[in-house]
Image (cartoon, rainbow, N blue to C red):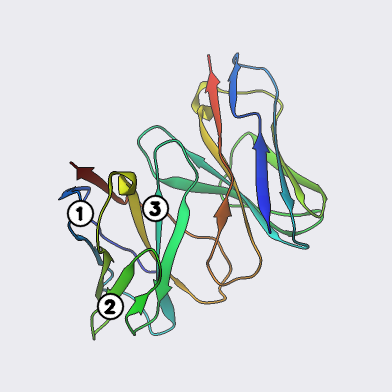
Amino acid sequence: SQTIHQWPATLVQPVGSPLSLECTVEGTSNPNLYWYRQAAGRGLQLLFYSVGIGQISSEVPQNLSASRPQDRQFILSSKKLLLSDSGFYLCAWSRDNTGELFFGEGSRLTVL
Amino acid sequence: DAKTTQPPSMDCAEGRAANLPCNHSTISGNEYVYWYRQIHSQGPQYIIHGLKNNETNEMASLIITEDRKSSTLILPHATLRDTAVYYCIVRAFNAGNMLTFGGGTRLMVKP
């Protein structure tokens, strides 16, 4: 069966520090991968999606970046965090374009 | 993707049916209706999707009006564990998975 894991689950970082969130999918190959962010009390905002290794599309301009160094690995990064980067970050995968996404457990980032 | 409108919150008694409405009056012919839910501090979970026929699975039923301008997600016997935010999304099938999640409906199941 397929599983998705992301870490760390909780992170507290000072403003200006770097960020790296990792996500891996197991049990499938060539998945579509996504990073979403959810600010407190808000809906989900799509940040990045990837249809293959090294292929990243950004949905919103920001100081975040994403990379896909391996088929089932998706990384969300920042060189310098802002207060507004605080939120709940969710990685997701899909096996095709049918609209069924499988989400990870989420990573809660607090920037102080 | 077409825009959806959902009530911000609803209450339901435990054991009763929860009927969650969604308006999507600008839906086009090739767009499906999808439902997800998000339990507090967890990732969203896919529930069901449909085009024009009513659909049922082990989690819920989806009723789509004949003109497809609205739909209702039905949880037949709500439990406390069904307390969550429910998102209604419309998108074209095979149009990519860039799902746009709106505010959703916060369902509170009460004992």
Residue under numbered circle 2: B64
Is residue A20 in sight in this rendering?
yes
Residue displayed at 66% across by 66% down: A95
Residue under numbered circle 1: B15
**Looking at the figure, which quarter contains the N terminus of chain A?**
bottom right
Q: CA distance from mark 2 to mark 1?
A: 23 Å
Quick one: SS at disc 3?
strand
Amino acid type, residue under disc 3 in the picture: Arg
Residue under numbered circle 3: B37
Q: Earlier in the sequence, mark 2 or mark 3?
A: 3
Q: Are marks 2 and 3 on the same chain?
A: yes
Quick one: SS at disc 2?
strand
Judging from the image, mark 2 belongs to the subunit labelled B
Judging from the image, mark 1 belongs to the subunit labelled B
Amino acid type, residue under disc 2 in the picture: Ile
Quick one: SS at disc 1?
loop
Residue displayed at 33% across by 53% down: B86
A21 sits to left or right of B61: right
Q: Nearer the viewer, residue A71 or B19?
A: B19
Amino acid type, residue under disc 1 in the picture: Gly
Q: Nearer the viewer, residue A53 or A65?
A: A53
